[in-house]
Image (cartoon, rainbow, N blue to C red):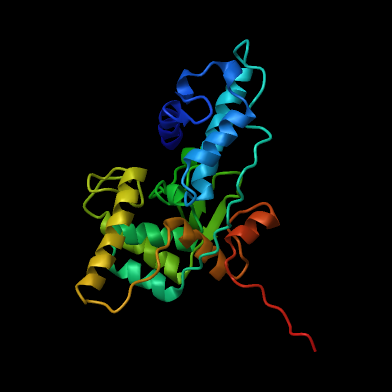
Amino acid sequence: QKSYHRLLSSLAEWEMPRIKKPFGTLLLQQIGNKTIQSAFDQQFDAELKNTARNRRFAVLKVVFNWGIQRFPGCEKNPVIGLRIPAEAPRDRYVSDKDYAFILDIAPTRLQLIMRAIYLLRLRPSEARTIHRKLSEADNKAKKSGVVDDGILVFRGKGSWGGLVEWSDDLLKWNTDCKTHNRDFITKWQIRDNKGNRITKGALDSMWRRVWAKAQLMLEDGQVESIPDHYTLHDLKAKGLTDHPNKDAGHKSPKMREVYDREHRRELPTR
């Protein structure tokens, strides 16, 4: 939502090449398919990733749909029918070596989040909100957290939740979380330095810093090489790819394939 609000602010100042006015000053009847398409074609750098470009299409589509429902004169959505650039699917598989490299140089709470994402096949936002111990009320409220038999997880975006049973690695992760929290009264399995839930901004900042640390290690000659950059979300894909049942709660085979980064195996022609 914060990202979309920033996009709205920038779009209001977006100079329209055909009309020579900022987008936010146009009348509704001046805004059509050609107005928006030409602005995308002429003003955005060719190297702008399609994912970033498509977010701009998406926020405009939402705004005009909202306006159609509420304002006389806003009768059509000028984004519908535009040529939306195709987004290249993300196929980065994080090797055990690349995973271990960043894990080893990360601060403790980032290590715990990385391990939670991988072991539980969670999104980063879901890994930040695991509770230390779930009550009966928490269970009914669909909160993720520690129960007797493992970690109960509730995944967003329509994915299945469920109980992830204890394994040796998951038990070790749970013990390390307890050690990290031993001096804090907190309800969170992974907490910040005040015992509160880690915010998205704080997590993003930790992730940027650990990669900056890796780059400095390379420049100082401490290591010969560092991994190609990967995201925290890629660790969920690694968790699914490494999982024997390829299970991360996805209800459709299509979404499961998005996260499975293992190459499909084929037999040669005889």
> In the rendered image, which quarter contains the N terminus?
top left
Tell which residue pokes out farthest to the right in this image.
Answer: 270
| x, y percent for residue 218 | 26, 72
Judge whether residue 177 can be spotted in this image: no
- In this rendering, the answer to whether 77 lies above or below 166 is above
In this rendering, position of residue 128 left or right of residue 104: right
Q: Looking at the image, which residue is at 26% across and 77% down?
A: 223
Q: Is residue 220 left or right of residue 113?
A: left
Task: Check the image and report above or below for 110 versus 128.
Answer: below
Instruction: Identify the image quadrant of the C terminus.
Output: bottom right
Residue 43: percent from the left, percent from the top?
48, 39
- For the view shown, which residue lies furthest in the top direction? 72
Determine the residue located farthest toward the bottom in the rendered image. 270
Viewer can see residue 124: yes
Q: Nearer the viewer, residue 122 or 35?
A: 35
Left or right of 250 in this view: 26: left
- Which x, y percent locates residue 264? 66, 73
Residue 218 drawn above or below residue 58: below
Comparing 214 with 206, the one in front is 214
Q: For this rendering, which residue is in front, 211 or 250?
A: 211
Q: Position of residue 7 (x, y in %)?
A: 44, 34
Q: What residue is rendered at 40% in x and 64% in y?
A: 229
Look at the picture and state if 237 lies above or below 203.
Answer: below
| Quadrant of the image occupied by residue 103 | bottom left
Who's the residue at 27% across and 54% down the image? 181
